[in-house]
Image: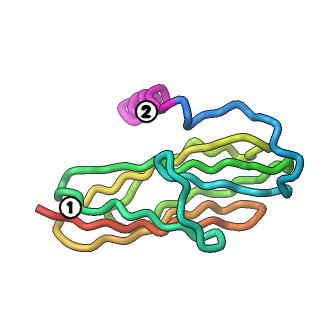
Amino acid sequence: MKIFLTLALASIIALPAWSSSSPTMPDPTTPQDQLEVTISDSPATEGHRRYTYNFGNVRVNWSQWAYINLRNTGYSTIRVYHVNIYGSGFSGWSSCPYYLHGGQVCSTRVEFRPWSRGYYSGRLDYILSSGNIYVDLYGWGVW
């Protein structure tokens, strides 16, 4: 448990400046309860609250990770009920608080670590009061 806490604390401290942001006043023309998703500093490809991220080819027993950021661009506070990661070969942790206030950002680090050759798929779910967001995860384990 001490090792996990030490690693978690070290990861939080090592986060780049873009992953944590103090709340700012959103644009008044933006509708309330708007969410913006970025994956490793790039806008995500959206299909009505469903996104995809492909890790590509990753060597067996090696790992690659991506930061998936969720920003509340509206004025209303959004309740974050759960952040779940599904699928063998995928794991991670999230800094998302229980309440995501207007202008606030939270980050989820997703790791892909294949243990054998082949195709892997999984999913990251954000269960929110304003509607759920799903990120489909893909990758290949290679030698």
| Picture quadrant where residue 53 is located | bottom left
Q: Which amino acid does label 2 sit on?
A: Ser
Residue 97 percent across, percent down from the top left: 67, 43
110 sits left or right of 118 in the view: right
113 sits left or right of 76 in the view: left
Viewport quadrant of the C terminus: bottom left
The number of numbered discs placed on residues in the rendered structure image is 2
Q: What element carries label 1?
A: loop
Residue 14 percent across, percent down from the top left: 44, 28
**Residue assigned mark 1:** 115
Residue 81 higher or lower than 122, as above or below = above
Q: Which residue is drawn at 65% across and 73% down?
A: 48
Q: What element carries label 2?
A: helix
Q: Main secondary structure of the magenta part?
A: helix
The one of 138 and 127 positioned closer to us in this rendering = 138
Whether residue 31 appears in magenta in the rendering, the answer is no
**Part of the protein shown in magenta:** 1-16
143 sits left or right of 63 in the view: left
Q: How crowded is mark 2: few (under 14 residues within 10 Å), some or many (20 or more)?
A: few
Residue 98 percent across, percent down from the top left: 71, 46
**Residue assigned mark 2:** 11
Q: Which residue is drawn at 52% across and 65% down?
A: 135
| Picture quadrant where residue 47 is located | bottom right
133 sits left or right of 25 in the view: left
| Picture quadrant where residue 57 is located | bottom left
Q: Residue at x 80, y 57 (%)?
A: 33
